[in-house]
């Protein structure tokens, strides 16, 4: 009888130890696997919805997102076409020229550089043509302009008309009545700048910034996995209809497509990606172009350029400028820069 | 060694169901969030089939856990052309109306779409 009792006690102790260990393991696994929570916030800026998704072990993600949004807001206001904005000052000064700040000089010189590299396929001076078509304002009714109207404004277009003073790189003049627009390139620049601010506050922060499809990576998901980015099917029945996936641990990606801003007149699709040679929507045979680059600003500008170039030899020059392109053509065939596939596996 | 006594089985059940809840039931079914001019305008359930009016400029429809824009005053109707969306985190954006419709949720197959 005594023996059995002792045996029972031992059983209970073993049972208790097992139970305790089991619970401990479960609790440990739960807290170990519990990933850092991603904080996500969306605001209407840069003419689109900007989403910042960020997580940090050492900082409040709200704080990081706040700082980033403040900077994007600043850039959005600075590069608008509002009266008294820096862009208007440059356009009004024309040939007389105007002194601009470092940041504007940086953006404008980059815009000119991409224009030069792509032989005008991306051109910051195309703005008057954009206005003529009504693509500068999402709310405007759009129609095909007269040939004569296009010809008239086309004479002012050309990135060579942006001239930096030889002695003072912050002094810029616009020749031949050219007008610039920096709103497009400022979108990518704002993402880059906000990424920098988050990184300066917390270099281990992870997440991404998405400004209407221009995506910059803060850091890999949970610090170890790539972000899975879908490339929209340009003729999909739904915007979540994805044609290819890319996996990014860092860097940026941007897409230009003929479905973003277009109208149809007499059965012809007129989209917003205008060719600076003709003044008409580019007929390169591309429906969308996606570019991966280390900078969101360059990804955006090169994506526009790649769309306008299409499958021309010029596009093969993009990789040597750090831009990998993926084109979807009208027959649903595609073109990939050598090396693009590296981003299509985890 | 007898680990399952008459009543111990209940104890195990309680513990395992508790742990099960802890692991798997953390994801609540997604809601649909509508933002206007950057501000949250309304949150509606994704599980309830319905049509909602956003002021006088837009209508959204929820059906079978999907959402789409059915009416909008914008000139290009790109939000309507965005079609049905059932993936959390993928927004339907109407730039002229400064409106965004998005299903809440996390950890999906796609994180974000470049377009």
Image: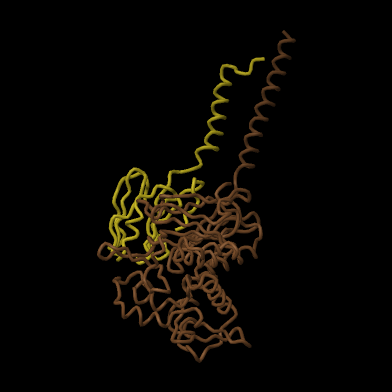
Chain colours: A brown, B yellow
Outermost residue to the front? A313
Residue A64 in view of the camera: no
Q: Nearer the viewer, residue A16 or A126?
A: A126
Q: Quadrant of the N terminus of chain A?
A: top right
Is residue B91 found left or right of A38 in the rendered image?
left
Outermost residue to the top? A1
Residue A250 in view of the camera: yes
Position in image of residue A266 (x %, y %): 25, 64
Outermost residue to the bottom? A96
Is residue A167 found left or right of A153 in the rendered image?
right
Q: Nearer the viewer, residue A229 or A41?
A: A229
Q: Nearer the viewer, residue A304 or A102?
A: A304
Q: Nearer the viewer, residue A180 or A7?
A: A180
Position in image of residue A241 (x %, y %): 41, 50
| Residue ID at (57%, 84%) | A164
Position in image of residue A245 (x %, y %): 50, 49
Against B44, is A43 above or below?
A: below
Outermost residue to the left? A266
Position in image of residue B34 (x %, y %): 38, 57
Q: How many marks?
A: 0
């Amino acid at each position: 009888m005594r023996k059995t009792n002792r045996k029972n006690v031992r059983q209970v102790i073993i049972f208790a130890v097992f139970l305790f260990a089991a619970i401990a393991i479960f609790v440990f696994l739960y807290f170990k696997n519990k990933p850092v929570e991603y904080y996500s916030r969306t605001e209407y800026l840069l003419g689109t919805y900007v989403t910042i998704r960020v997580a940090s072990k050492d900082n409040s993600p709200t704080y990081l997102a706040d700082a980033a949004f403040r900077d994007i807001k600043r850039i959005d206001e600075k590069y608008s076409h509002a009266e008294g904005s820096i862009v208007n000052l440059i356009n009004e000064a024309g040939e007389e020229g105007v002194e601009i700040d470092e940041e504007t000089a940086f953006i404008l010189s980059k815009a000119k550089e991409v224009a030069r590299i792509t032989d005008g396929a991306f051109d910051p001076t195309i703005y008057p043509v954009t206005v003529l078509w009504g693509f500068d304002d999402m709310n405007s009714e759009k129609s095909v302009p007269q040939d004569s109207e296009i010809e008239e404004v086309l004479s002012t277009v050309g990135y060579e008309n942006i001239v930096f003073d030889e002695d003072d790189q912050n002094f810029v003049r616009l020749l031949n009545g050219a007008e610039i627009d920096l709103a497009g390139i400022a979108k990518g620049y704002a993402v880059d700048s906000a990424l920098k601010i988050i990184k300066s506050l917390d270099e281990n922060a992870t997440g991404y910034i998405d400004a209407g499809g221009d995506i910059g990576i803060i850091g890999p998901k949970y610090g170890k996995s790539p972000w899975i980015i879908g490339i929209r099917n340009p003729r999909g029945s739904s915007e979540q209809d994805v044609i290819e996936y890319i996996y990014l641990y860092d860097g940026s990606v941007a897409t230009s497509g003929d479905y973003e801003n277009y109208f149809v007149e007499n059965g012809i699709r007129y989209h917003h990606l205008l060719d600076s040679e003709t003044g008409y929507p580019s007929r390169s045979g591309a429906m969308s172009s996606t570019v991966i680059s280390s900078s969101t600003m360059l990804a955006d500008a090169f994506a526009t350029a790649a769309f306008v170039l299409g499958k021309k030899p010029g596009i093969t020059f993009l990789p040597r400028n750090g831009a990998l392109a993926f084109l979807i053509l009208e027959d649903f065939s595609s073109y990939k820069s050598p090396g693009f596939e590296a981003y299509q596996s985890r | 060694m007898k680990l399952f006594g008459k009543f111990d089985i209940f104890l195990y059940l309680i513990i395992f169901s508790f742990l099960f809840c802890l692991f798997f039931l953390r994801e609540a079914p997604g809601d649909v969030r509508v933002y206007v001019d950057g501000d949250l305008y309304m949150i509606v359930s994704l599980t309830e089939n319905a049509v909602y009016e956003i002021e006088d400029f837009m209508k959204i429809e929820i059906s079978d856990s999907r959402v789409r824009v059915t009416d909008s005053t914008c000139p290009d109707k790109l939000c309507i052309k965005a079609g049905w969306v059932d993936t959390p985190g993928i927004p339907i954006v109407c730039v002229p109306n400064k409106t965004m419709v998005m299903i809440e949720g996390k950890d999906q197959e796609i994180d974000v779409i470049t377009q």
